[in-house]
Image: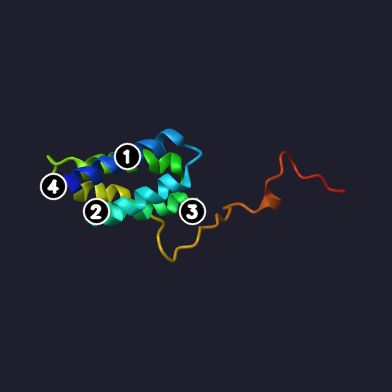
Amino acid sequence: MTRTETRIETRIETLITRLVQQAPALEADALHSLVLELERNAAPLALSIARVLQLVGANQIDQGIALPALAMACGTLVDPRLTAREHDAARFEIETLLPMPGTAPRIAVPDVPIAQLIRGPRRQP
């Protein structure tokens, strides 16, 4: 591992820690800096983390759900003892947070019409 790689990895850990500590008021500069560091890393896991972070910043993914998973994924990314297998598992977990493209929210249709939801016997006027 080169000195530059070590600096980037330390910076990634520092920035994700700062974001977790700031929640729910995320600092846009810290978020943007972390996305840039992850894109510079360019590993598939790093790019997945960056994409989810962008959606968290745009309020399209709930940060309360995403930030713990993102912090763990960043830890996996920068741990030199972990292999591609662990990186793929972390990437899979992160990508489950991404919205499904082209799917609209499902509107629930009641099984019973509202007119039949009257308590007691019906009274004739």
- Left or right: where does residue 80 sit relative to residue 104? left
Q: Nearer the viewer, mark 3 or mark 2?
A: 2
Q: To which quarter of the image does residue 76 belong?
A: top left
Pointer 2 local density, CA inside 10 Å: few below 14, some 14–19, many at least 20: some
| Mark 3 or 1, nearer chain start | 3
Front one among 31 and 121 = 31
Mark 4 and mark 3 lie on one chain; the one further toward the N terminus is 4
Please state the horizontal and vertical placement of residue 46, each as a whole percent of the image.
27, 52
Q: Earlier in the sequence, mark 3 or mark 2?
A: 2
What is the C-alpha distance between the residues marked 3 and 1?
18 Å
Residue placed most toward the observer, 37 or 26: 37
Q: Is residue 81 left or right of residue 37?
A: left
Q: Real-space Cα distance between discs 4 and 3?
A: 34 Å
Find disc 1 in the rendering and name its residue: 71
Q: Residue 58 got which mark?
A: 3
Q: Which residue is mark 2?
A: 41
Of all residues, the one furthest to the front in this rendering is: 3
Kindly state the secondary structure of the residue where label 2 is placed. Answer: helix
* Measured Cα–Cα span from mark 4 to mark 1: 23 Å
Task: Look at discs 1 and 2 and give the one toward the viewer.
Answer: 2
Percent x, y for residue 109?
57, 56
Q: Residue at x 37, y 52 (%)?
A: 52
Left or right: residue 52 compared with residue 79: right
The numbered mark at residue 2 is 4
Amino acid tagged 4: Thr
Q: Disc 2 vs disc 4: which is toward the camera?
A: 4
Crowding at dot 4, Cα within 10 Å, few <14 / some 14-19 / many 20+, comes out as few
- Residue type at mark 2 is Asn
| Image position, residue 67 (x, y; %) | 39, 41
State which quadrant residue 120 falls in: top right
Mark whose residue sits in front, 4 or 1? 4
Measured Cα–Cα span from mark 3 to mark 2: 22 Å
